Amino acid sequence: MNNDDDQLPVIVLTETNAAVPVLIAARGHHAGRRFVEFFTANIRNPNTRKAYYRAACEFFDWCDQARLNLLDIEPVHVAAWIEDISGRFKPPTVKQWLAAVRMLFDWLVVGQVLAVNPAAPVRGPKHVVKVGKTPVLGAAEARQLLDSINTNTVVGLRDRALIALLTFTFARIGAALRMNVEDVYWQHRRLWVRLHEKGSKQHCMPCHHHLESYLQDYIEHAGLAGQDEQPLFRTAGRRTKVLTNRRMTQSDAWRMVQRRARDAGILTAVCNHTFRATGITAYLDNGGSLENAQAMAAHESPRTTKLYDRTDDQITLDEVEKIGI
């Protein structure tokens, strides 16, 4: 039998071991285990887990400095914390952290650690987003970037294939990097890709003819054919430029697109999501429907897809140029 003096469990978060906050640990072993279960059993996405864990630690550290214990926490304290962090962080972060704390308290209430959720009545800052902030390339810039990549090396072929995949399938960078070689396959005489989206969902898309050519060139020259269960997009040795067996990370991809954009003379501050937004905008600008763009991007809501649509930017630019001064 465990008792309150037993060693509390530890949450394993990708690269670090994260301990139970002092206020939770002070309530005993059951509270500590319930806290751990919230992050391990209830939250499956590793990025969400890390973000919510940080929010919980920030909140309980704040409460500890205010000399509160777990049972002392009331809505007024949660509201005061929200006011405090609102001066240091942007509204989306504040809203996310409040949501994390609210969900955690719900979990503790269900586990009979607390009687009520003190965060339930607290409202976060108002934040309405109609246009996303992701930098977008014009169609000509995207083509300039793809054409500028030196494809005499396997690294160049890899980079062109990855950027094209993000652009022509509207793929999230995480879904693209989780692909294995077997996720590029033939169906109905057309090359298809299988993307591994959030929540273990799979999203399949036929390839644009440019993407089909780029993927075939990369797989052939990299010698990946037949390595079905191996990573599709791999790192390369810094000096040898030979592909390793290690899967590229999002940080690897970010550094790559920064380098490629700089070499191509692209002034836009690109990021991994730039190509998803670029593809959606180009599709809608050429007469594609928002409904189909939503399905292709695997968005739950058309409002999310609309955040990536920058077709109005050109209209605005045309109107500005009418100011004949």
Image (cartoon, rainbow, N blue to C red):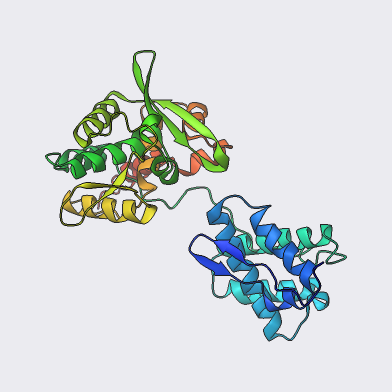
Question: Which residue is located at x 43 percent, y 53 percent?
Answer: 133
Count numbered badges in the picture: 0
Q: Residue at x 72, y 72 (%)?
A: 79
Q: Position of residue 314 (x, y in %)?
A: 34, 41
Say left or right for 221 vs 313: left
| Residue at horizontal 65 percent and vertical 68 percent from the top | 56
Q: Position of residue 197 (x, y in %)?
A: 50, 39
Instruction: Write down the quadrant of residue 229 in the picture.
Output: top left
Closer to us: 323 or 317: 317
Q: Which residue occupies the foreground of this view, 119 or 43?
A: 43
From what the image shows, is residue 20 above or below residue 135? below
Query: Which corner quadrant of the image does residue 2 belong to?
Result: bottom right
The reply to whether residue 270 is visible in this rendering is no
Do we see residue 32 in this rendering? yes
Q: Nearer the viewer, residue 57 or 81?
A: 57
6 sits to left or right of 211:
right
